[in-house]
Amino acid sequence: MTVSTLDQAIDDYLFALRIERNLAENTIESYSRDLRAFRMLCERNQKLSDVAEVDPGDVLEHLYELGERGLDNKSMARAMSAMRGFFSFLVRQARIASDPMALLESPKTHRRLPHVLSQAEIEQLLAVPNPTSDKGVRDRAMLEVLYGAGLRVSELIHLRLSQMDLERGFLVVYGKGRKERLVPIGASAIEALERYLRLARPYFYGRARKKGNDTDVVFLTNWGKPYTRQGFWKALKSYVDQAGLKSDISPHKIRHSFATHLLEGGADLRSVQLMLGHADISTTQIYTHVSRKRLQEIHRRFHPRG
């Protein structure tokens, strides 16, 4: 059996996640934080020199301390998931003889149904940007693409000209872990994009060129720079306020709305999974609960014995 220090074992596992499983950096950072927290306990218990010395008692002690800090079930489950993956990796590599977490159960987590906008609320939001200004034309296109393709905010702000095929109505999107997917966009989004590219983007691109910047990022700020996540969130919040909608609307809730409206319109779950870029269909299944809730409301309202 190979002898590894705990630090080396953690570094090797995170490297494997990055290279072999191609996980997103945010996910790897979360795993790293959880494992480094466990490392602190092992350091206190003098078990850094050989990862094989870690036993179920160390794991239970760590989980007890997390509970004492007030972690909720979701955070506790994530911490346990990080450690399960870590120890499973070490077993496969024959660095430990047995998994110290083998007999532990993860706490039950209850996924909350995502809040979604109604189709009428989406229309309210899309109607706010001023169609006679470069800024309004750009922002209307951003909102149309966000909703029309169900993109994550990072996918929207990093979208490049080379990723668009407007003639055939598709975007090539790079999601978590740089996984590529084709996403169709509808006539409204295509029309808004074409109008932006023809009328408004040349102005913002000109401002970029004046500063010596040549970029093929689709959506540029007033200063000719690519958007940041915070910058787009700020713009969205302004339009949400102007539309008189709930102030907690986020880009991700618009993505939730995209998925829910597709399912309510009759789309199958597998197609929605592919468009959202979910690796596991169980992630997409939460939207079926939202859709069922809507169907129950319709049944109660319109069925004579509802």
Image: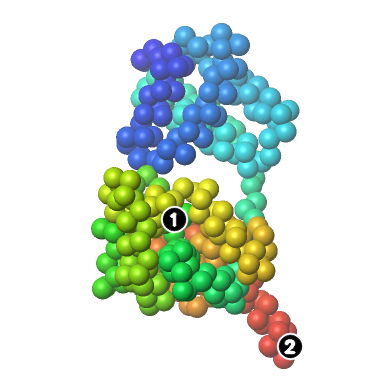
Q: Nearer the viewer, residue 239 or 107?
A: 239
Instruction: Give the residue at mark 2.
Output: 305
x%, y% of residue 57?
Answer: 62, 20
Q: Can residue 252 be seen from the camera position used here? A: no
x%, y% of residue 267?
Answer: 45, 74
Q: Can residue 69 be seen from the camera position used here? A: yes
Disc sitting over residue 45 in the figure:
none
Type of colouring: rainbow
Q: Nearer the viewer, residue 37 or 245?
A: 245
Using the rendered view, name the quadrant where residue 55 is placed: top right
Instruction: Say which element carries label 1.
Output: loop
Q: Residue furthest toward the front?
A: 210
Q: Residue visible at 47% across and 24% down?
A: 98
Query: Which image quarter holds the N terminus?
Result: top left
Task: Name the amino acid, label 1.
Answer: Asn
Q: Nearer the viewer, residue 120 or 297?
A: 120
